[in-house]
Image (cartoon, rainbow, N blue to C red):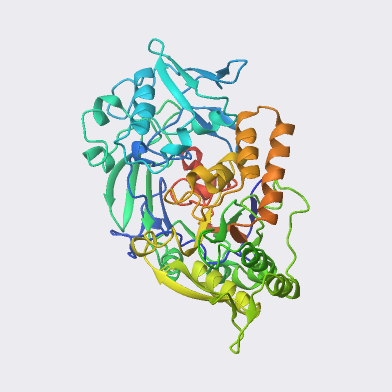
């Protein structure tokens, strides 16, 4: 899969799904970024990181700008060497990965990079006291050891097929981060790395500023100053782009369309694995009923959501894997069938009351659905889901709140959630569906529990045979259709408008998270000025 690039924005649309976090709504401080100089770029996103420390999860999927991983990904999402000289040597049993490191690499403060920094990074993330919400992604690691200055060896507890994909993780300097509190030290906001850019300032809620690292092992970037403005409001981003204060921005379709005839700018539409789904906690008195979950799964009109909410920039979602992915299990698409949804509920004993809402054994078919405040695309999806559910006789009460309000409730109540990673099918499915992760924060929010799915997920991550893995993930997707713990709604494309003055722009297939490391600026360090 590759992202497509189009001139203008004529009907290449993206729903306003770009507000996926709770970043502060503020314009970038300072002057007009787009006029700052021929070697400067200012772009805008809707969100910002919570921390800039890879030890706490920053940049775990690559493209962190300040840091490098052992490996990185090219435009086609293929792994290639970064801090490692080459792709790893893997033992016959799939449990040992050996990396030979690139020599002569230095951190931006001039200190040499070595194997001890790699060991420090991974061991610190896995330490019990480190508040990294993504540490379970590395739970296959048994040991990580340095062999001299330039070799690192990972030993895994079990063969984990996509382990190399995890080594895009940024490497932190032991000589700095190792002398601080990992969770609250100065390194979380003033990081030092080996990456192509050096952080020069972070005004939270406003902008992150970077300058080119003249000593980067890959060469000094032609873009000398790079600024990521944090602007939550879609209209403000569009206005500042039009005024020349921004060189690029992520925009919803109705605003991007306003730049369709602007020959000085180009529109880039990136395909993604970014999905929206409704969690259906399996121990709730309503959503815990399999008949209710099956009925909701076919009562929703996914095609209408894509057409009306996303203006066509996306596709119906039937699970975490998009329908155009080679990992998608053909035949697991669910057709919108309201009559069948009603029959499923009738047969299960859910009878319609005078107001049209069903009851069973004194329990009313009613439950709340939470979405994050200020996120219009989640609100729109929640309202559309509730409308479709009501036609089947199920009352869904939509509620907005911050994550601080939602998190204590999401173990028992439904949430309009998002996710998705194109790196490997294990990334999309293991933490989402494995029963042992039920109720573990944002992992398996539905408390999904299906022994056949658990077995298939284990087989899919432990086998190196693509055919075996494909069969395993086909099993997962078929079981998810028969026994849904979530109602997946849409996969969403991301849309960007950028000044047409640089060569080398393009997009990757993007994950759910997008901002600093995604969009056409994922490779800003390789851009070159257009020749006039």
496 left or right of 203?
right
Q: Quadrant of residue 111?
A: top left
Residue 348, position in %: x, y?
Answer: 68, 69
Identify the image quadrant of residue 309: bottom right
Identified at 57% across, 68% down, the residue is 253
Residue plotted at (54% across, 28% down): 164
For the point 21% across and 33% down, which residue is it?
180
- 411 sits to left or right of 465: left
On the image, the x and y values in percent for residue 107 come to 33, 27
Residue 5 drawn above or below residue 289: above
Q: Is residue 172 left or right of residue 8?
A: left
Q: Of 430 and 81, which appears nearest the observer?
A: 430
Which residue is depicted at the point 50% across and 43% down? 436
Q: Is residue 175 above or below residue 407?
A: above
Image height of 208 relative to 17, above or below? above
Is 469 drawn above or below residue 400 in the view shown?
above
Residue 395 x/y as whole percent: 55, 77
| Closest to the observer, 177 or 12 | 177
């Amino acid at each position: 899969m590759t992202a497509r690039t189009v001139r203008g924005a004529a009907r290449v649309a993206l729903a306003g799904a770009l507000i996926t976090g709770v970043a502060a709504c503020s314009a970038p401080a300072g002057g007009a970024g787009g006029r700052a100089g021929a070697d400067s770029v200012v772009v805008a996103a809707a969100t910002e990181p919570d921390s800039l420390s890879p030890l706490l999860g920053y940049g775990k999927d690559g493209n962190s700008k300040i840091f490098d991983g052992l490996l990185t990904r090219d435009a086609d999402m293929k792994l290639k060497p970064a801090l490692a000289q080459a792709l790893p040597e893997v033992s016959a049993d799939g449990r040992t990965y050996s990396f030979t490191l690139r020599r002569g690499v230095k951190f931006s403060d001039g200190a040499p990079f070595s194997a001890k920094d790699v060991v420090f990074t991974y061991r610190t993330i896995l330490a019990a006291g480190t508040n990294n919400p993504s540490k379970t992604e590395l739970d296959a690691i048994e040991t990580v050891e340095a062999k001299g200055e330039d070799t690192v060896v990972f030993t895994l507890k079990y063969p984990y097929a996509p382990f190399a994909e995890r080594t895009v993780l940024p490497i932190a300097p032991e000589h700095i981060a190792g002398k601080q509190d990992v969770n609250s030290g100065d390194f979380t906001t003033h990081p030092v790395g080996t990456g192509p850019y050096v952080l020069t300032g972070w005004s939270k809620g406003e902008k992150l500023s970077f300058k080119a690292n003249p000593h980067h092992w890959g060469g000094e970037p032609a873009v000398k100053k790079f600024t990521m403005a944090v602007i939550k409001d879609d209209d403000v981003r569009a206005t500042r782009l039009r005024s020349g204060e921004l060189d690029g921005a992520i925009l919803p379709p109705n605003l991007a369309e306003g730049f369709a005839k602007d020959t000085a700018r180009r529109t880039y539409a990136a395909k993604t694995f970014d999905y929206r789904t409704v969690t259906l906690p399996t121990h709730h008195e309503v959503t815990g009923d399999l008949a209710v979950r099956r009925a909701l799964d076919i009562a929703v009109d996914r095609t209408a959501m894509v057409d009306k909410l996303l203006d066509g920039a996306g596709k119906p979602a039937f699970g975490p894997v998009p329908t155009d992915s080679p990992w998608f299990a053909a035949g697991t698409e669910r057709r919108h069938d309201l009559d069948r949804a009603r029959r499923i509920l009738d047969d299960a004993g859910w009878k319609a009351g005078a107001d049209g809402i069903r009851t069973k054994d004194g329990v009313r078919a009613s439950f709340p659905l939470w979405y994050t405040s200020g996120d219009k695309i989640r609100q729109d999806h929640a309202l559309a889901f509730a409308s479709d559910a009501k036609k089947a006789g199920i009352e869904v009460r939509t509620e907005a709140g911050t994550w601080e309000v939602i998190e204590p409730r999401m173990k028992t109540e439904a949430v309009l959630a998002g996710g998705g990673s194109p790196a490997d099918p294990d990334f999309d499915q293991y933490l989402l569906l494995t029963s042992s992760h039920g109720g573990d924060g944002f992992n398996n929010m539905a408390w999904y529990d299906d022994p056949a799915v658990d077995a298939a997920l284990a087989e899919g991550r432990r086998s190196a045979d693509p055919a075996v893995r494909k069969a395993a993930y086909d099993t997962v997707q078929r079981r998810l259709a028969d026994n849904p713990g979530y109602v997946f709604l849409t996969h969403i494309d991301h849309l960007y408008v950028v000044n047409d003055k640089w060569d080398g722009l393009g997009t990757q297939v993007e994950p759910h998270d997008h901002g600093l490391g995604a969009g056409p600026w994922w490779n800003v360090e390789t851009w070159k000025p257009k020749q006039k």
